[in-house]
Amino acid sequence: MLKSVVRAVGAAVRVSSATTSTARALPLSCPTLCAPSSATTRPFTRSLWMLNNNGASSGYRPKLFSSKALHPSLSCGCGGLHTEGDKAFGDFLSDEIKEEKKIQKNKSLPKMSGGWELEMNGTEAKLTRIVAGEKVAVTFNVNNSIPPNFEEEADQGQQQKAAEEEQEIVSTPNFVVEVTKQAAKHSLVFDCHFPEDEMSHGEGEEESDIFAIREVSFQPEGDSDWKETCYTLNTDSLDWALYDHLMDFLADRGVDNTFADELMELSTAVEHQEYIKFLEDLQGFVKCN
């Protein structure tokens, strides 16, 4: 009789432990399935989502577990997986591409004034000019050149007004200026960027530099890699008189506010072209064209 009671109590404990274990396991998976992660939320979206929010009103929502995904269509000879989700994705991309082409300002890349010659290599652009025997080269890459928009409107009316007005997306890439003299073995290289607090200056205000020098260094001529073994001057703690002379040195060679404005316009056009091309390639990949 005592052994039976012990076995019954042991079984009850095992059942209770199993129930407790299951209850503890469930909440661990719930945030992943039920709540979107704040780290993956995009701060802003482009054209179609930003202008008319068709994505939210289309009624399509991806499902975590869909039996349709287990039955791919065999109509395509590529051997890839084709689902209802892929079809909806492809239709969305088609609409997105049309909207982006509608708002595209420059079908061809704008020209830079000052005799700069443009050379493109994918997302990287290189501008070169010769000034009295000196070669000046400016290189920039449009990847990650769109500043994120973290501003949130507190007033609902302001949110609606902001949604009605198209927000202009401007590419502000970091760029490197390389000045090479004929008799010198090294090039003077400037690492420049667009500070966010200097991006706008209204009429009537004293014009300030819209770009800034972050670092200056002598680097081997023609070497595309920045050598960390060469001394690099950081301008954060630099004397302002020396910094002003460095900015004047660039301005005398055509790298001034006018150049920076035109560079932003060029970079924005390049970035938008690459974005549309990426959407087209993504559509072709999803549809297996």
Image (cartoon, rainbow, N blue to C red):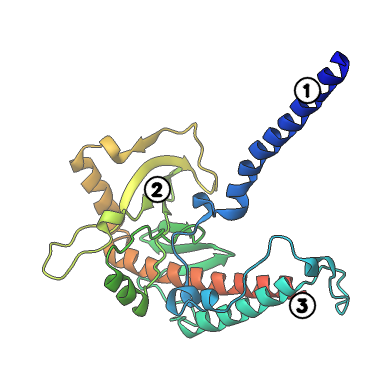
Q: Amino acid at mark 3?
A: Asn
Residue at which label 1 appears? 9
Q: Amino acid at mark 2?
A: Asp
The answer to whether residue 200 is seen in the rendering is yes
> Residue visible at 66% across and 39% down?
23
Give the CA distance from mark 2 to mark 3: 42 Å
> Residue visible at 47% across and 81% down?
104
Placement of 234 over or under 136, stated as above or below: above
Q: Nearer the viewer, residue 79 or 38?
A: 38
Placement of 14 over or under 108, stated as above or below: above
Find residue 191 and name its label.
Answer: 2
Q: Amino acid at mark 1?
A: Val
Residue at which label 3 appears? 289
> Residue visible at 28% across and 58% down?
251
Q: Nearer the viewer, mark 2 or mark 1?
A: 1
Mark 3, secondary structure of its residue: loop
